[in-house]
Amino acid sequence: MTIKKASAAENLIFSMRGPIVIVFLLLTAFFAFEATNVQLSTDMKKMVPLKHEFIQNLFKHKDELSLGNDIRIAVENTQGDIFNAEFMEVLRLVTDEVFYLQGVDKSKVASLWTPNVRWVEVTEDGFRGGEVIPPTYDGSAKSLEQLQANVLRSGQVGRLVADDFRSAIVYVPLIEQTEDSAEKINYKEFSDALEEKIRQRFEKDHYKIHIVGFAKKVGDLINGATGVVLFFIIAIAITFVLLLIDSKCIRSTITVVLCSVIAVIWQLGILTLLGYGIDPYSMLVPFLVFAIGVSHGVQLINEFAVESSRVADRVTAARLTFRALYVPGILALVSDAIGFLTLYVIEIRVIQDLAVAACLGVFVIILTNLVLVPVFLSYVGVSKTAIHSVEKKQAGKAPFWRAISHFATGKAATVSLIIAVIGAGVGLYIGKDLKIGDLDPGAPELRPDSRYNQDDMFINTRYSVSADVLVVMVETPDEGCSKVAAMDKIDRFMWHMENVEGVESALSLVTVSKLVITGFNEGSWKWAQLSKVQDILNNSMQNLPSGLMNVSCSLAPVIVFLNDHKAETLKRVVKAVRDFAKVEDDPEVAKFVLASGNAGVEAATNQTISRAQTTMLIWVYGVVTALCLITFRSWRAVVCVMVPLALTTVLCNALMTLLGIGVKVATLPVIALGVGIGVDYGIYIYTRLKGFMEDGLSLDEAYFETLRVTGKAVCFTGLTLAIGVGTWIFSDIKFQADMGILLTFMFLWNMIGAIWLLPALAHFLIRNNIPKKAV
Amino acid sequence: MQYPNKTGTSKGRSAVLAGFLVAAFCFSPIVESSNRKDELPARPAIMSAKAAKALLTDVSVAGNKIAVVGERGHILTSTDEGRTWVQGKVPVQVLLTGVFFVNEQLGWAIGHEAVILHTRDGGSNWEVQYANPYKELTDEQMDALSEEEFNQLPRLGSPLLDVWFKDEKEGFVVGAYGMLLYTRDGGANWEDWSARLDNLDNWHLNAIGSADGKTIYVAGEKGLLFRSEDAGSTWSTLPSPYEGSFFGLLTGPQPGQVMVFGLQGNLFASAEAGENWQEIKSPTENSLMAGVALDAQNLVLVGNSGTILISKDGGKSFSAQTTKDRQAIVGIGKTSSGKLLMVGQGGVKLATPASL
């Protein structure tokens, strides 16, 4: 190989080694200080497609339409029903305790023990009612009997009391949070308080506490995300050990790990300075940055050991290392960064933030690894064992790589190609069932077997509540939401929706109005029809529960309860709403506008993602292909590098289908990250292969030499990347685990594809197409 | 939740009427030709797989045919003891409140907007025979009304509440605000016979029934009880044991036996054709809505909050049960094989007498 001359950059860097180390260390201290201020953000606004029509409608009506931010605490008696003095005492204590929690709207707390829970019945003289727990309650058998009768006629079965009478709910609404409310609820603290003051105190003997609600979910999410920090330490430890085994040199191992950690610190510090927080998605970036840093570091210490075996002087060896690797290193890192940037086309803030953070991280690595690692090495040097090991390998026969190099020969190449085609076919066949969106029931952010989702399941099966809610906003002129014509449309709309597959029931002011009209008529269900007389309708809505219309009566939500939040269900339901609106929308009377509720947000997210999916694939492959074309100036090279990546993408989709993972906010970036980083392997291998062939070697000999030089580094890179993200598989947060599984798969398969499939393709495409250089 | 006054008291009644007048700023003619079926908006009931699970209000059994009616113009028929249901084509979407089949082919259904629907093909297709839909009147039209017409204004759009046919030709329908309609020709023409009852205040008439086709009983709001002994031509007011609303009545099995029941589980029986009444100790405070006699000894009454009352001694005493879901039961019928078919808030429920 030709010896290049020292570049200006190299001369500059190595003439100022001392100042560089000092400046880097000072900067690191500064960024580390900044990074301690990093905020964990769980702002839901960032996780939704803000530009989507549904979300814009939602935000338009956000302040006038409170969907309620509440918590339900179910107290369960595992050995009997609720009608005994001991249980009622526990329920009373839980109810009392709830009043002391920060952020609770005390006036609206409801349980059997609060005076706002009453029974009503129709008598000859009008209505009669009272508190469910009689004022004379003393826990005696007689008063428990009275309590039981009151519960039955209170209509609270299915709401505050379970259908099986074995548990009762304390309903805890939280104080409204507006943009400028002085007191913001800290969800983590609130959730921890629930655990500490309610669950830990009262869940004992045969009593169980089940807690669900948005605030609890976010609290669990934050706690789960915080647990990921531990994974980072584990990833560092594993990487350290592997590096040590591989390099046989503690000095260079520490150098690489240290510089990679510095890269992470810089990345976090700069992000904080730029005003970005870190969220459960962008948490992935430090793992990636560390892993990418290490994988480039491996190349550097590998090269440094090789150079050290040739020259005695550490500084010269470091200079030669820098000289050999800074161009391909920068090229690979820039292509990574550009690959990540394509994620920016998806109009969901967390994904865009992820793109920015990853991009930034990669640029940081150029400084911390490509500059700092050689400088450090020029001071610390490398162990004798490491140099000996390198020398031995260069002289040896490398039987393993010899065996692998057969992939480039005729028969093996043909078989490989056939296997690849079959694999792609099977992958496409399985992957065609790939679903959009979240597929698991309950809170999809958390694992199906998490405590939260178990509690959610408990309450869903025993109470008349549904976790999956689509809210259709009915817009009317001012004071128009209770007009006969509007109510009639809403009534018919509800029945239209209830007849859609996947819809359980619908609720709106019409539901309440019919109930009250039935009540006006002595509880006779033969009167359960909306009146055509405006005054009767108005009367029937005098005491409408909050949230069913806004103050000016120009907006009434129809709450549609769904069986699940699968993408097909959401699609069907959204279409049904649109079908109805197309015929019935009348600006003078009522317009049916999508959408709010968790299902509304998911429908919008699904639509955005399924649109973005194709766009993103085109961008990623387009950009990476263009980079390859610019680098190699040959379509054959592009095919050799890109086809293994495409195969991995196809297989990844098939894997998602098999594992029941849908395309969602968390998994959409995986392909871009996988392809962006995965292309590195191909670039390294193809560059060397081409070089050896230009030197006059035949394809299989050239490939053998390539493997000898770079095979180990490529494998090691794949492994470190896989370890970095692989720890995520154990995250408490479901989508982090999904990202972990898929990225691990993509990093490993991209590596396998580069080593196994690339030479087979090369056999058919470039065997006789690389002109030998004139010697 | 706090409710305003119920409409059952005279105070409540006048309040509703006053509200009605305030609301009615543009009025139009009504009363003279009371059948205004042509003014009903054309909006056929939607065919729905959920119809048998939505609110249903009444059952009628004739031979092997079972018919049930309910909200949104739902009429369903079954010929397999209620296991499967076929929805009929109905031209209206209003809440239907009563159904009566005289045989497996001929049936009538009634409901809000004072509609009377008729089928000749066993419930597959229905046509409107009568209606009195809601309409707003202008001030001039209001001024032109006679006092009697004015008193009957609330009937516009209000529901008919029960239907009974003596045979294929002769039948009666009772309803809100004192409505009593009669046909002698299978519903081709309906006559307003409301005035034949002594009900000047136009209290709701909730139930009509007869065991023999000759002695007919009507029960209503305010403890109103009427009897006709000449197949409906003339009516007398019966002494009433109760001030509140009766929602249902049950005649037989012995001649002269009749039972009435209603608000708050109140329950009365007479062995002398309603001339005098005995209060029967009721095991429930939930309103009772409908009843059926399985045989001379076994009676079943049903009502709100899933209440089921059972008597095994011909109605002398009752014991209470409650369905698990506690949803209101509004109607009950006995199928040809002796099974019980209950309808209400959650649609159709089947039960065998032994399981009760």
Image (cartoon, rainbow, N blue to C red):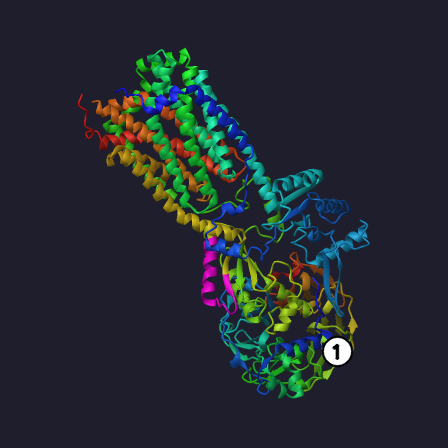
Q: Where is residue B197 in the image (x, y as percent from the top left)?
A: 69, 84
Instruction: Give above or below for B112 relative to A677.
Output: below
Q: Quadrant of the C terminus of chain A?
A: top left
Residue B175 can be seen in this image: no
Tag 1 residue:
B274
Report which quarter residue B257 is drawn in: bottom right
Magenta residues (range) = A569-592
Residue A112 can be seen in this image: yes
Q: Indicate the amino acid at tag 1.
A: Gly
Q: Position of residue B9 (x, y in %)?
A: 73, 74
Chain letter of the residue carrying label 1: B
Q: In which quarter of the image is the N terminus of chain A?
A: top left
Instruction: Left or right? Give the position of A456 relative to A349.
Output: right
Instruction: Give above or below for B102 relative to A447.
Output: below
Report which quarter residue A380 is drawn in: top left
| Residue that appears at 40% across and 40% down | A341
Q: Residue furthest left?
A: A774
| Residue that appears at 77% across and 77% down | B240
- Closest to the observer: A715 or A405? A715
